[in-house]
Amino acid sequence: MNLIKNILSRTFLIVALIFTNQQLLAQSEAHLYFDGVNDFLETQDPLLNTVSSDFTFEAIIKGNSEEQGENPTILSNRWSPIKGNSFFFQENGDAPRELCFSHGNDLYYIPDNGPFDGDFLDGFCHHIAIVKKDGDIFFYADGNLYGVIINPYYYCDVLDSPADIWIGTDHHYDRPFKGVIGQVRIWNDARTSEEVILNMHASLEGTESDLFGYWELDEGSGQIVFEKTSLEWSGYLGESTGTDGFDPDWFEGDYCINDGDYGDGEDDEVEDEQEDDSTASVENSTIAEIALYPNPVNDNELTIDFGSDLKPVTITIISISGKEVLQRQVTQTAAKVKLDVSELTKGIYFVKIEAVNQTITKKVIVN
């Protein structure tokens, strides 16, 4: 009976993928929220069996630590306590949970998350990456390398397991994640620091070399979740292709820009905000036409070109974790504004520009 159910489930999935393939070309701006009780999604094949030696795992997460259960899981193909792999946040007493990779019985993590200053589960968006290169394992947070495990002698190269990949919980243990998970990627190579930084918030094509699995998780509706490198690896919400109590929920909006909201459906507006201010005026321009350069910023100065005079303007630079790192008020007429970003660390930032009746947010990379 289980075999028949599985065959029927996979057949339905293939048919659904054929008729909804156009979603790959124009996905909506949306995100997937896991309730921390029993939500998860299942892919259709044990993809990690084909990953050998070097690998890279990436994901974007957003959640609150106090709302999590034990060891909340991002991705797992574990089918027994000693077989399979899991990427999760490990309990750490009263300290913030540690980003952890388990391979069979072996655990790999940086004690107390090393120099990472803060909690991964702090209600803001974080990009995390774990890279295996030769004999070493590298840990990244928001594009920054924060720890390396040098040549652990007990590491096994092959990420083998007969189980399908689950996102949002663990196969063998009850370890659901509460919050948003997106941009889940598995590479069959060791990504460099530069590659991690430049691509961590990019929407990839799915044809990139050595990209083995890529779930954006931004379809916005339906039961099917697409894996962009091949429809063969796509999956569905919950236990089946039909709706059930294990389905995560879809919400509209960019969960990294709308800080503090990660699934209640009430995202903050980031554009077209209306303000009643009769004393201010916008002259001969709209902030939708602005240009930021150079981008990436390779020196210490970022130029914001409005094309023509504009006043007044508030410019705020926000880190990927949601913290305001720079703000400037422009009250005089100016077509260009130059910002000193020499104090910013390497990574991705959002530049939020607010004028009368207008708000726009653009992404900038600081190298």
Image (tube, rainbow, N blue to C red):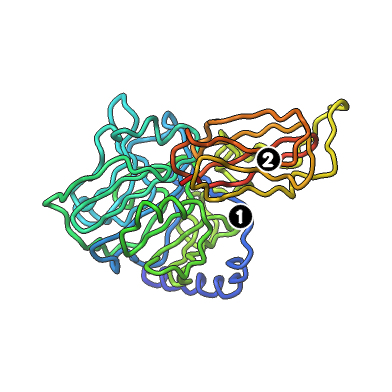
Q: Distance between the residues labelled 2 and 1?
A: 19 Å
Residue at figure coordinates x 45%, y 61% from the top left: 214
Check disc 1 and report its element: helix, strand or loop.
loop
Picture disc at residue 77 = none
Q: Name the residue under label 1.
A: 220
Q: Is residue 199 above or below residue 314?
A: below
Q: In this view, does 191 lie above or below 345?
A: below
Q: x, y (%) of residue 167?
A: 41, 53
Amino acid bearing label 2: Val
Could you tell whether 359 is left or right of 43 in the image?
right
Residue at figure coordinates x 46%, y 52% from the top left: 200
**Residue 222 lies in what quarter of the image?**
bottom right
Pick the front one: 161 or 227: 227
Query: Marks 2 and 1: which is nearer the front?
Result: 2
Q: Earlier in the sequence, mark 2 or mark 1?
A: 1
Q: Mark 2 points at which residue?
A: 270
Q: Which residue is outermost to the right? A: 278
Amino acid bearing label 1: Gly
Q: x, y (%) of residue 33?
A: 52, 45
> Cβ–Cβ below 8 Å for labels 2 and 1?
no
Q: In which quarter of the image is the N terminus?
A: bottom left
